[in-house]
């Protein structure tokens, strides 16, 4: 089955480009990335900090059934424009990966559809390639599928 979320990684470059089209208005897509409760639902993680403003920060963590933290990440919001873009850092805690720079662009395609483009820049080509060896593409696709389902339910309830 073809993944709807596309990951493009050009050889020798320190970046990846992630794109996905959604059957959601751009306002709801943006909301899925900026409202803690909604973000928790589709990402399957607990948000411990979510300050979506310039110079704000965020942090989230995922626990196993025993309550042990198995993944945590944090970052700083450098710029945010409603329904258009988020520029932020992203750091996976307790891993050898250094901080990454992320440029998220939200695009209205029609009144009912939208697209996200995420450019992630890594410290080196080697770190980028190590990240791509993880089940990264499948994970992003699963998360974006949950985003579509979660927000679609919200949309139909309102």
Image (spheres, rainbow, N blue to C red):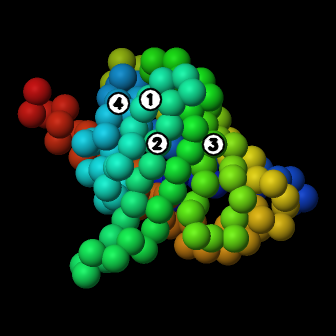
Mark 2 lies on a secondary structure that is strand
The reply, left or right, for residue 141 in relation to residue 91 is left
Tell me whether the residue at label 3 lies in contact with that at label 2, contact meaning CB atoms closer than 8 angstroms. no
**Point 63% across, 43% down: residue:** 89
Mark 4 lies on a secondary structure that is helix
Report the residue marked by disc 4. Answer: 31
Q: Earlier in the sequence, mark 2 or mark 4?
A: 4
The residue mark sitting in front, 2 or 4, is 2
Report the residue marked by disc 1. Answer: 52
Estimate how packed mark 1 is, as few (under 14), some (14 to 19) or many (20 or more) residues with alpha carbons within 10 Å: many
The residue mark sitting in front, 3 or 4, is 3
Q: Earlier in the sequence, mark 3 or mark 2?
A: 2
Q: Earlier in the sequence, mark 1 or mark 2?
A: 1
Tell me whether the residue at label 1 lies in contact with that at label 2, contact meaning CB atoms closer than 8 angstroms. yes
For residue 26, above or below residue 18: above
Residue 58's tag is 2
Q: Earlier in the sequence, mark 3 or mark 4?
A: 4
In the picture, residue 62 is in which quadrant?
bottom left
Estimate how packed mark 4 is, as few (under 14), some (14 to 19) or many (20 or more) residues with alpha carbons within 10 Å: some
Work out how far the residue at label 3 is from the one at label 4, CA to CA, in angstroms. 19 Å
Residue 45 appears at what percent x and percent y? 34, 58
Mark 3 lies on a secondary structure that is strand
Tell me whether the residue at label 4 lies in contact with that at label 1, contact meaning CB atoms closer than 8 angstroms. no
Mark 1 lies on a secondary structure that is loop
Report the residue marked by disc 3. Answer: 89
| Residue 132 visible within the image | no
Q: Earlier in the sequence, mark 4 or mark 1?
A: 4
């Amino acid at each position: 089955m073809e993944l709807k979320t596309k990951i493009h990684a050009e050889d020798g470059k320190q970046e990846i480009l992630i794109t996905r089209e959604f059957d959601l208005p751009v306002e709801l897509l943006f909301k899925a990335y900026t409202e803690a409760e909604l973000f928790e639902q589709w990402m399957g993680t607990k948000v411990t900090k979510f300050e979506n403003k310039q110079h704000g920060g965020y942090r989230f963590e995922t626990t196993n059934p025993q309550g042990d933290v198995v993944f945590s990440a944090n970052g700083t919001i450098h710029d945010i424009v409603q329904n258009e873009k988020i520029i932020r850092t992203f750091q996976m805690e307790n891993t050898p990966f250094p901080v990454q720079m992320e440029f998220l662009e939200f695009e209205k395609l029609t009144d009912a559809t939208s697209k996200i483009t995420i450019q992630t820049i890594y410290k080196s080509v080697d770190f980028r390639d190590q990240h791509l060896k993880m089940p990264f593409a499948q994970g992003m696709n699963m998360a974006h599928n949950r985003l579509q389902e979660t927000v679609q339910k919200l949309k139909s309830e309102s």
